[in-house]
Image (tube, grey):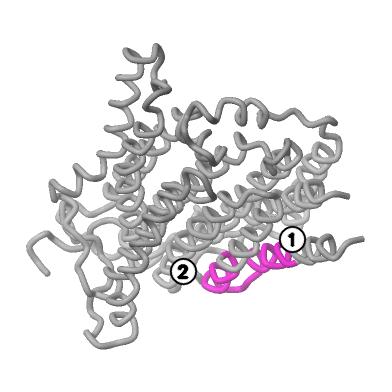
């Protein structure tokens, strides 16, 4: 048994331990803290599964952004924890545990009886990858072979944001999201919010650019940009924009709109929706990725910022 | 047991744990956290299947890996919407219980009309 394998077993135990903690923790806040560490451990699992692109996404979005969201929600909802009732009785809990155990056993049985050799699309992807001009197979799948999924996912992000905004009371519609902006100008947070973003913006763009040939991509880069923007807003260095701003809305839809436009041009130029003419595949993918990075960064940041809580006039 | 099987089984346990939490926790926010656990367990099973599809220099089948990246982003968007909904319910009714028999909380006056 190799050392790597021992480490993998330890990692699996730690992941399961953190998962159990998020379920049994007494307060929602400790549960959310558990979920953040769970997400970080899980991204190590993704590295062991040779999926570094997924590991970056899990660490940035699954653990980082979801963590910010859950921690702030747990703080807001803390007062309600006693009023949610006691939940089902012991008999129901045991019954639920048995049923969930069955689900686990069924999935485990599937995992243990997967066909050998495993079906894989990797040879096809590797064979077709040179035509896209991209070197990272995962980016190739996201931007070319399964581009429709990526396009629809941009649409989902924008729709979810509209959903979040629609939870605002009528009188705040079009106003500013309610992130804290009461901090003093010379605390630790404003200091970081002034010094980190230049580096973070560089890193975010680098991740997008390098994603063509190495692990990374528009999702991971966009998340770093969103995190930097959130830091600036949360520290009160810059206020969150009013959601009725025209530049904001145009920038938000620019990703899906450019994607859709390139896809429609592909119908004429290459014979299918979202097909790229081989000679200019790489420039087209970059043309899609740049506004996509903007959309992802803005949508992720605003999803965390939440619905507007102040009118556009009041500051 | 190889790496893919180990983490595939880990994913199976996470699915069960998340499902149990989503079913039995009375508090909606805890259900949401448990639901995210359930989702990541499914992604992990998918990742184990991707790992088994390793071919040549590619460490795993890139198609399921790309789908998991999309899935993580969509799961985050859905979570953000659920959190926004919970916070609005709190503002409206002073509580977020799903229990139909729970005593009514302090109903704050609706101020947005």
Identify the image quadrant of the C terminus of chain A: bottom left
**Residue A120 appears in which quarter of the rendering?**
top right
Q: Residue at x 19, y 52 (%)?
A: A243
Question: Measuring 70% from the left and 50% from the top, which residue is drawn there?
Answer: A49
Height in image: A130 above or below A3?
Answer: above
Residue on which the image places disc 1? A90
Left or right for A87, reference B70:
right
In the rendered image, residue A10 lying in the magenta stretch gets the answer no
Q: Residue A284, position in %: x, y? A: 35, 31
Taking depth in this image into account, of A180 and A152 the one nearest to the observer is A152
Circle 2 packing at 10 Å, graded few (<14), some (14-19), many (20+), is many
The segment highlighted magenta reads: A14-35
The residue that mark 2 highlights is A71
Label 2, secondary structure: give it. helix
User: Which chain contains the residue that carries disc 1?
Assistant: A
Closest to the camera, between mark 2 and mark 1, is: 2
- The residue nearer to you, when weighing A64 against A96, is A64
Relative side of A75 to A31, left or right: left
Secondary-structure class at tag 1? helix
Q: Is residue A73 visible?
A: yes
Q: Are marks 2 and 1 on the same chain?
A: yes
C-alpha separation, residue under disc 2 versus residue under disc 1 = 29 Å
Q: Is residue B32 left or right of residue B48?
A: left
Q: Earlier in the sequence, mark 2 or mark 1?
A: 2
């Amino acid at each position: 048994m190799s050392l790597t394998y021992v480490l993998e077993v330890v990692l699996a135990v730690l992941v399961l331990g953190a998962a159990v903690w998020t379920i049994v923790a007494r307060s929602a806040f400790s549960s959310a803290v558990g979920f953040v560490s769970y997400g970080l451990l899980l991204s190590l699992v993704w590295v062991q599964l040779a999926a570094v692109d997924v590991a970056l996404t899990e660490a940035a979005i699954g653990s980082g952004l979801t963590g910010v969201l859950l921690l702030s929600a747990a703080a807001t909802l803390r007062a309600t924890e006693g009023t949610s009732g006691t939940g089902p009785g012991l008999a129901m809990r045991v019954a639920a545990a048995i049923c969930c155990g069955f689900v686990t056993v069924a999935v485990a049985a599937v995992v243990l009886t997967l066909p050998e050799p495993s079906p894989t699309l990797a040879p096809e992807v590797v064979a077709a990858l040179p035509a896209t001009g991209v070197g990272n197979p995962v980016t190739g799948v996201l931007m070319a072979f399964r581009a429709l999924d990526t396009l629809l996912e941009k649409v989902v992000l924008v729709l979810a944001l509209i959903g979040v905004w629609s939870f605002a009371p009528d009188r705040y519609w079009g106003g500013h999201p309610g992130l804290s902006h009461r901090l003093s100008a010379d605390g630790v947070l404003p200091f970081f919010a002034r010094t980190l973003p230049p580096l973070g913006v560089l890193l975010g763009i680098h991740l997008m650019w390098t994603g063509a040939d190495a692990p990374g991509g528009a999702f991971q880069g966009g998340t770093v940009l969103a995190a930097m923007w959130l830091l600036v807003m949360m520290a009160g260095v810059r206020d969150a924009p009013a959601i009725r701003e025209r530049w904001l809305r145009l920038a938000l839809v620019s990703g899906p709109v450019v994607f859709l436009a390139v896809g429609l041009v592909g119908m004429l130029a290459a014979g299918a929706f979202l097909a790229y003419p081989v000679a200019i595949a790489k420039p087209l993918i970059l043309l899609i990725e740049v506004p996509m990075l903007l959309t992802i960064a803005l949508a992720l940041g605003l999803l965390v910022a939440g619905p507007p809580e102040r009118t556009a006039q009041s500051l | 047991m190889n790496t893919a099987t180990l983490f595939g089984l880990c994913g199976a346990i996470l699915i069960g744990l998340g499902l149990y939490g989503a079913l039995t926790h009375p508090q909606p926010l805890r259900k949401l956290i448990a639901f995210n656990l359930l989702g990541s367990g499914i992604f992990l099973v998918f990742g184990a299947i991707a790992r088994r599809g390793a071919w040549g220099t590619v460490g795993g089948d890139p198609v399921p890996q790309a789908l998991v990246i999309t899935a993580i982003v969509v799961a985050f968007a859905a979570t953000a919407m659920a959190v926004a909904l919970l916070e609005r319910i709190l503002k409206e009714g002073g509580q977020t219980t799903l229990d139909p028999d729970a005593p009514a909380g302090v109903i704050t006056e609706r101020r947005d009309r």
